[in-house]
Amino acid sequence: MRMSGDEIKHDRVWNGFDYALQVWVINGYIQDCGHPEEMKNQGCCNQHKLAGRSILDISGAEICRK
């Protein structure tokens, strides 16, 4: 059971942190990471790779059912 105050819509984290993907989500879209450009150019993390995509379209996203 999820204990955070994250907003859940469509059984996905809509606003908050998706623990399965290790990404922050705002309004259903994965946000870019805060890593320096040098790290981003080397493919630093899932958050950078998935930034801008809808959480509904990502395989492996956390399922949050009541």
Image: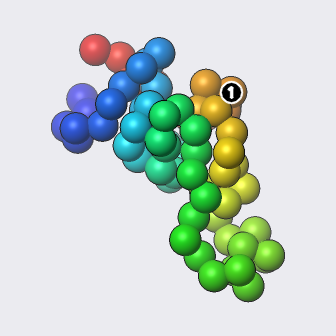
* Number of other residues with Cα within 10 Å of mark 1, as a class: few under 14, some 14 to 19, many 20 or more: few
Using residue 49 as the reference point, say whether residue 25 is left or right of it: left
The residue type indicated by label 1 comes to: Asp
Q: Please say whether residue 62 is visible from this viewpoint.
A: no
In the image, what residue occupies the spot 44% across and 31% down?
14
Q: Where residue 50 appears, x then y in whole percent?
A: 69, 49
Q: Under tag 1, what secondary structure?
A: helix
Q: Where residue 42 appears, x then y in whole percent?
A: 79, 76
Q: Is residue 40 above or below residue 8?
A: below
In the image, what residue occupies the spot 23% across and 40% down?
4
Using residue 39 as the reference point, say whether residue 14 is left or right of it: left
Q: Number of marks in the image?
A: 1
Q: Is residue 8 above or below residue 42?
A: above
For the residue pair 61 and 17, the one nearer the viewer reads as: 17
Quadrant where the C terminus sits is top left
Q: Please say whether residue 53 is visible from this viewpoint.
A: yes
* Mark 1, residue position: 57
Q: Is residue 49 above or below residue 54?
A: below
Quadrant where the N terminus sits is top left
Q: Where residue 24 appears, x then y in whole percent?
A: 47, 50
